Amino acid sequence: MKVIFVRHGKAAPYCEDDAGRDLTEFGRLQAQQTAEYLTEHYQLDLIIASPYNRADQTAKILLSQALALGQNPSFLSLSSITPDDDPVIAIDDLEYAVRTKLGEDLTGKCVAVVCHMPIVASIVAKLENLSPASFELAEARVLQMSVLAQGLATIQDTFIPDQPQ
């Protein structure tokens, strides 16, 4: 199974309502670049997004691109992958969501998870059994693993779209 972790695109400045921050126009362009790369190289079966606006918007750009290319991924929102959530709980919740949507045989399946820093780096670090490494805006890292569990993943691919100057 491949699990692609994506950080959301550039969002509006920090404010009191962190969950309500939307993507900027540049962030939408970044999300589109990442979506084009991912859908050109991978057949998505499931897209999981944080419920925060900027991650949800990034994930829906990915979903729209996948649908335009004839892919038909399922889509769901997961409340435990917001910026300050516990990565261990997030991994358990992701594993449960993936098995619930895709079944027990995950051979050949491809899942995209769209969330935030710092949790995206923490999840990937735990899956790889490495130290956390920061994600650029709208960066995607493709991990190969037999099951979604700590220490069992290896990075197969990375894509970084245009970044702000």
Image (cartoon, rainbow, N blue to C red):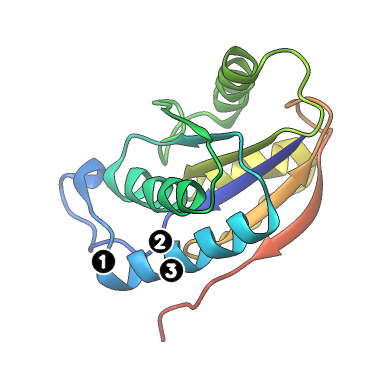
**Pointer 3 or 2: first along the chain:** 2
The quadrant of the image that shows the N terminus is: top right
Q: Which of 50 and 69 is in front in this view?
A: 69
How packed mark 1 is, by other alpha carbons closer than 10 Å (few <14, some 14-19, many 20 or more), is some
Which label was assigned to residue 9?
2
Whether residues under marks 3 and 2 lie with C-beta atoms below 8 angstroms apart, the answer is: yes
Determine which of the numbered discs, if any, sits on residue 121 in the image.
Answer: none
Residue at screen point 78% across, 46% down: 130
Up-down relation of residue 67 to residue 133 (above or below): above
Residue 30 numbered tag: 3
Q: Position of residue 112 (x, y in %)?
A: 58, 41
Amino acid of disc 1: Thr
In the rendered structure, which disc, 1 or 3, sits on the residue that comes first in sequence?
1
Q: Where is residue 50 in the image (x, y as percent from the top left)?
A: 40, 36
Q: Which amino acid does label 2 sit on?
A: Gly
Asked if residue 73 is positioned above or below residue 147 in the image, the reply reads below
Outermost residue to the left: 16
Q: Does the image show residue 121?
A: no
- The residue indicated by pointer 1 is 24
